């Protein structure tokens, strides 16, 4: 996975606390948009929403700590792929999650982040989702 440009890493690090402070609102918006586009996905979730918010925050933190460190990022991607393996997610579902994250960031963080910071987060989210999509096994022919 290509390393994020150093300037983008800095933009994400300086804005991290502002993003983390909105973790619950971000998680809520993320699932809102995910379920709007994938109504059937809601039934897959068995744990309560506070667990999902905590897990969402954990991905934010681990992802931020792994920025620019390809090996750490691959560990995070592998871990996420393992945790979703039993769900048999499709490429389309993963890119829907990317769009849901993008919309959640725009709606929740617009007033708190500069345009450059939003762009840096968007780029990092895109890279994470593309790495996850690349790890999804294609359906058997
Ligand atoms: C950006 C992409 C995604 C990220 C970062 C992400 C992150 C996570 C995390 C951190 C967990 C918690 C794992 C655990 O408790 O061990 C989780 C669980 C889960 N995710 Fe995702 N996820 C993504 C995409 C998706 C998509 C596209 C779907 C379905 C269409 C999905 C469905 C689920 C389900 C059903 C669970 C299990 C919830 C439960 O235990 O009740 N995820 N996800």
Image: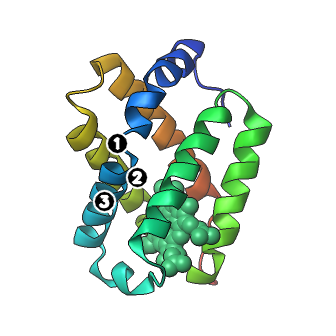
* Left or right: 54 as drawn, with respect to 108: right
Q: Report if the CB atoms under discs 2 and 1 are less than 8 Å apart.
A: no
CA gap, disc 1 and disc 3: 10 Å
- x then y, percent, for residue 113: 30, 24
Query: Between 37 and 76, which is closer to the camera in this rendering?
Result: 76
N-term-proximal mark, 1 vs 3: 1
Residue drawn at 36 percent across, 61 percent down: 96
Q: Looking at the image, is 43 positioned above or below residue 85? A: below
Kind of element beneath mark 2: helix
Q: Is residue 99 visible?
A: no
Crowd tier of the residue under label 1, counting other residues whose Cα lies within 10 Å: few below 14, some 14–19, many 20 or above:
some
- x then y, percent, for residue 108: 24, 41
CA gap, disc 2 and disc 1: 18 Å
Residue drawn at 59 percent across, 56 percent down: 132
Q: Is residue 98 visible?
A: yes
Query: Between 93 and 125, which is closer to the camera in this rendering?
Result: 125
* Left or right: 14 as drawn, with respect to 24: right
N-term-proximal mark, 2 vs 3: 3
Q: Quadrant of the N terminus?
A: top right
Q: Quadrant of the C terminus?
A: bottom right
Q: Report the disc number at residue 28.
A: 3
- What is the total number of numbered labels drawn onto the structure image? 3
Is the shortest distance between ligand 1 and the CB of mark 2 under 8 Å? yes
Q: Looking at the image, is 51 positioned above or below residue 113? A: below
Kind of element beneath mark 3: helix
Kind of element beneath mark 1: loop
* Left or right: 87 as drawn, with respect to 65: left
Residue drawn at 59 percent across, 14 percent down: 6
The residue to which callout 2 is attached is 98
Q: Report the disc number at residue 22.
A: 1
- x then y, percent, for residue 134: 62, 56
């Amino acid at each position: 996975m290509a390393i994020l440009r150093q300037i983008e890493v800095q933009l994400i690090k300086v804005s991290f606390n502002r993003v983390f402070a909105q973790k619950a609102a971000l998680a809520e918006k993320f699932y809102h948009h995910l379920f709007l586009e994938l109504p059937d996905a809601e039934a897959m979730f068995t744990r309560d929403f506070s667990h999902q918010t905590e897990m969402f925050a954990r991905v934010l933190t681990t992802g931020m700590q792994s920025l620019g460190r390809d090996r750490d990022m691959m560990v995070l991607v592998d871990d996420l792929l393992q945790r979703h393996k039993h769900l048999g997610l499709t490429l389309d579902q993963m890119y829907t999650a990317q769009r849901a994250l993008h919309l959640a960031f725009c709606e929740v963080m617009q007033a708190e982040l500069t345009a450059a910071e939003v762009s840096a987060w968007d780029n990092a989210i895109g890279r994470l989702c593309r790495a996850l999509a690349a790890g999804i096994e294609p359906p058997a022919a």
